[in-house]
Image (tube, rainbow, N blue to C red):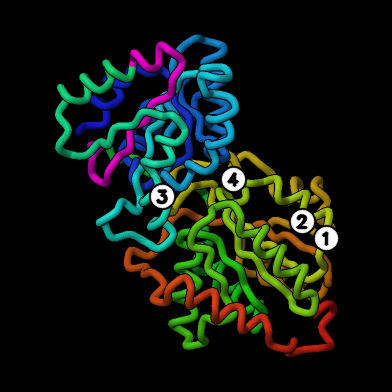
Amino acid sequence: MDVKRFAEALGAQFYTGVPDSQLKALCNYLMHTYGIDPEHHIIAANEGNCTAIAAGYHLATGKVPVVYMQNSGEGNIINPVASLLNEKVYGIPMIFVIGWRGEPGVHDEPQHIYQGEVTLKLLDDMGIASFVLDDSVTEEKLDSVMAEFRTLLAGGRDVAFVVRKGALTYGEKVVYENAYAMKREEIIRHVAHAAGDDPIVSTTGKASRELFEIREAEGSGHARDFLTVGSMGHTSSIALGIALQRPQKRIWCIDGDGSMLMHMGALPVIASLSPKNLIHVVINNCAHETVGGMPTAVGSMDVAAAARACGYPRAVTVSDPASLDAALESAKEAGQLSLIEVKCSIGARSDLGRPTTTAKENKEQFMKYLQKDCRNQEYKGC
């Protein structure tokens, strides 16, 4: 179905959400039609954030907003849905549009499998009426479903469209780019070489895929890397937990701007504990690139200044290879909690693969690696 016809059926004037590859047609339509516009379209930090923004929109206008997300974000909406939107509380209506990753019977990556199994059940448990949209749904059927949904919305209920792959299409091409030159894979290679034998925790999406392929190409093994294939936004917290329990090892965190933004409250927590053995690298391409390239709010933010304001003792921004290498070496020598923001272009190799080891294999190898004695007892906080 053409996404313009879908939007027409929804009849909404305001959309907010977190981009999803399954909803790329909708995301591109919104960016092409509105861009980032406070009156019509906002890309939020996380799914709970956009649900609250949508609630504010309804309170101010009396109109029904649309919240879009990948089904991995359902966990982030449970609190506002149950304690804010529900008809037993404020009865705030909204339409959720949810990309269905990990649908039972459809091959997908491991982080989506269980989430896919419980997607419809979670909606049912939260009292959200749902309809599964696929490429066989006719315009007449869509209009009929929306007629039923409008009755529920008028009573302060919430509804959801769960969107299967390929259900929505959009003919206009939307290009996402920025002015930075360094490629993410190049940045990760520099970080990996600087880290040497140190453990690395890498964020979800293409960053972990690129780290895996760098190790494959160099034949250096994968035991020292924890590839956070799911749980977007929590990479730095995982790295923090490791760093606190293994103070004799230097721990590296390869984060992304969208990931950092999603649960930015981790920054002051990390800073308050200030582990001397943690180096936090934020690769900032100002985009949710793994799911299509839509912009993040981090494009207008000074990440290093924000980290310092949160209490990081050291935080710098770099945008070229020489400055990156200098910052990496300086962080290693400092023996303090450090953050390095690296400005990055949008784009990845078209032949970029995926890890060939399972998530459990990765966990087991990584845990064994962490148990090893520190290789360099002279390191400042090794």
Q: CA distance from mark 1 to mark 4?
A: 21 Å
Q: Earlier in the sequence, mark 4 or mark 3?
A: 4
Residue to which mark 1 is pinned: 274
Q: What is the distance, in whole Å, between disc 2 and disc 1 at their CAs? A: 6 Å
* Residue type, mark 2 in image: Ile
Q: Earlier in the sequence, mark 4 or mark 2?
A: 4
Q: Quadrant of the N terminus?
A: top left
The residue type indicated by label 3 comes to Val
Kindly report which numbered mark, 3 or 2, lies closer to the viewer in this rendering.
Answer: 2
* Proximity of marks 3 and 2: CB atoms separated by less than 8 Å: no
User: Residue at position x 57%, y 71% from top?
Assistant: 226
- In-image side of 2 versus 296 (left or right): left
Q: Are marks 2 and 1 in contact (CB under 8 Å)?
A: yes
Q: Mark 2 falls on what kind of element?
A: helix
Q: CA distance from mark 3 to mark 2?
A: 27 Å
**Place of residue 80 in the rendered image (x, y in percent of width and height, measured from the top left):** 57, 31
Which residue, given by chain and number where applicable, does mark 2 sit on? 270
Percent position of residue 332, x then y: 76, 74
The type of residue carrying mark 4 is Met
Q: Secondary structure at mark 1?
A: loop
Mark found first going from the N terminus, 1 or 4:
4
For label 4, the crowd category at 10 Å Cα-Cα, with few meaning under 14, some 14 to 19 and many 20 or more, is many
Q: Residue at x 70, y 60 (%)?
A: 340
Disc 4 marks which residue? 262
Which residues lie in the magenta part? Answer: 150-171
Which image quadrant is residue 65 in?
Answer: top left
Instruction: Find out whether residue 170 is within the magenta segment.
Output: yes
Using the image, determine if residue 285 lies above or below residue 186. Answer: above
Locate residue 219 relative to residue 349 in the image: left or right.
right
Q: Is the residue 96 above or below the residue 186 in the image? A: above
Q: Return the residue at label 3.
A: 291
